[in-house]
Image (cartoon, grey):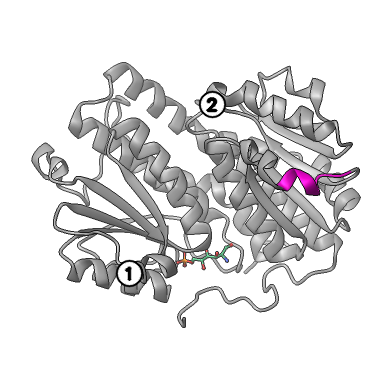
């Protein structure tokens, strides 16, 4: 049942091209000029009735929500707030019928997410679930559902659920932007053409895990690992750090690169591995200056960027490159080496990859 892989996690990492393909392909119009979300029957009036969107989720799904905020705000120009479900429930958020609440959950059974959904419905918000499990509690309770078609995810560490959640929030943002007519046909075509290429590009990022295995062996016994990035790269850094701590038990922290100076830089000393994501043009130079500050303290920097980038190599110790795509979609590619790094670090340390200590696949009790 592990399809020849040693662990479910590795199998699921390798299933990502198919999972992403199944989730996006039926939802892109043939001419690449629009997104088809037959599950939603929205029009401009309905969308305009929302003054605000909340995205509520836990763990990896919360990290997908952060990317969702970026996509919806950038493409559809609607304000979005992202909340951890267990916090959201207890902080009396301001919600009414002009609020759309999007919950994201692989299992559709996470208790905090489910409770947040019920509470927001009670307060009169419209609710939309993004989930992977047909007929799950969250799918049944939400007003509307968009399914991710990742197939069953068995490993505790979420991988293909995350990437399918990312493409789903992307499709949703494009759908909203289309309704609001705040994206040009040219830009739509450009993005959807890139989106179609993603499954094959994810495949390519999986082709040669050797450099990542080497890093895992080399740094697998370090006590701390830091992940840094800005903008979308920061969101992916958060997911990379969660993956690493969850299955390899290495202390990992993700920081918005610009925040380092406000405290964490004190922990950056000789030999500490720092994974630096640098893919976003608008903040690229800023990230580079943060990397220089880190290198000045003799930390080891592993940079992650796109194939066409030839400048990062000059200021880091190692570079991992992913195929070129639009910078909005690159999180789908940069997360893959981070998943593999967590996997091989866990193997190096002899951890139980699919069933990490103290954790359950689905958190149905508070
Ligand atoms: O089933 P859900 O997506 O609601 O689960 C949310 C989190 O429990 C889950 O993503 C968790 O953080 C993963 N183990 C992370 O790999």
Q: Residue at x 32, y 16 (%)?
A: 186
* Image location of residue 61, percent across then percent down: 47, 58
Q: Position of residue 338 (x, y in %)?
A: 68, 47
Q: Is residue 268 magenta?
A: yes
Q: Is residue 313 left or right of residue 270?
A: left
Residue shown at 32% from the left, 26% from the top = 32
Q: Residue farthest to the front?
A: 262
Res. 131 in view: no
- 270, above or below 34, in the image: below
Left or right: 109 with respect to 344? left
Classify residue 54 as left or right of residue 18: left
Q: Would you place residue 55 above or below residue 80 in this image?
A: below
Q: Position of residue 208 (x, y in %)?
A: 76, 39
Closest to the observer, 51 or 362: 51
Question: In the image shown, does 288 or 138 lie closer to the viewer?
Answer: 288
Tell me the magenta residue range. Answer: 264-269
Name the residue that disc number 2 marks.
325
Question: Quick one: SS at disc 1?
Answer: helix
In this rendering, the answer to whether 142 lies above or below 236 is below
Mark 2, secondary structure of its residue: loop
Q: Is residue 306 above or below residue 150?
A: above
Q: Of the numbered discs in the image, which one, if any, rests on residue 323?
A: none
Q: Estimate the x, y position of residue 128 in percent, counting from the top left.
A: 26, 57
Badge 2 or badge 1: first in the primary sequence: 1
């Amino acid at each position: 049942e592990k399809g020849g892989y040693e662990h479910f996690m590795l199998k699921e990492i390798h299933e990502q091209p198919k999972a992403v393909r199944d989730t996006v392909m039926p939802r892109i119009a043939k001419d690449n000029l629009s997104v088809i979300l037959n599950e939603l029957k929205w029009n401009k009036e309905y969308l305009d009735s929302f003054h605000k969107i909340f995205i509520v989720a836990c763990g990896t799904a919360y990290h997908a929500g952060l990317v969702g905020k970026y996509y919806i705000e950038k493409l559809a120009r609607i304000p979005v707030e992202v909340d951890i479900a267990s916090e959201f429930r207890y902080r009396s958020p301001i919600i009414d019928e002009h609020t759309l609440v999007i919950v994201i959950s692989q299992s559709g059974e996470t208790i905090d997410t489910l409770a947040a959904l019920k509470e927001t419905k009670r307060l009169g918000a419209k609710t939309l679930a993004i989930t992977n499990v047909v007929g799950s509690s969250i799918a049944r309770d939400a007003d509307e559902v968009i399914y991710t078609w990742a197939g069953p995810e068995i490993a505790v560490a979420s991988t293909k659920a995350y990437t399918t959640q990312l493409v789903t929030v992307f499709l949703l943002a494009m759908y909203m932007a289309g309704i609001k007519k705040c994206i040009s046909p040219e830009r739509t075509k450009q993005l959807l053409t890139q989106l179609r290429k993603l499954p094959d590009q994810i495949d390519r990022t999986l082709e040669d895990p050797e450099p990542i295995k080497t890093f895992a062996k080399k740094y697998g016994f370090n006590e701390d690992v830091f992940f840094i990035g800005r903008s979308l790269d920061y969101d992916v850094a958060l997911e990379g750090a969660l993956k690493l701590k969850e299955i390899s038990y290495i202390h990992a922290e993700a920081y918005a690169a610009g925040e380092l100076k406000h405290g964490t830089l004190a922990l950056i000393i000789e030999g500490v591995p720092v994974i630096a994501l640098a893919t976003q043009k608008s903040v690229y130079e800023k990230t580079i200056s943060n990397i220089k500050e880190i290198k000045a303290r003799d930390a080891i920097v592993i940079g992650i960027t796109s194939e066409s980038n030839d400048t990062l190599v000059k200021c880091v110790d190692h570079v991992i490159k992913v195929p070129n795509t639009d910078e909005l979609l690159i999180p789908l590619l940069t997360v893959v080496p981070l998943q593999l790094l967590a996997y091989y670090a866990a193997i190096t340390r002899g951890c139980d990859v699919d069933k990490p200590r103290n954790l359950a696949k689905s958190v149905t009790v508070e």
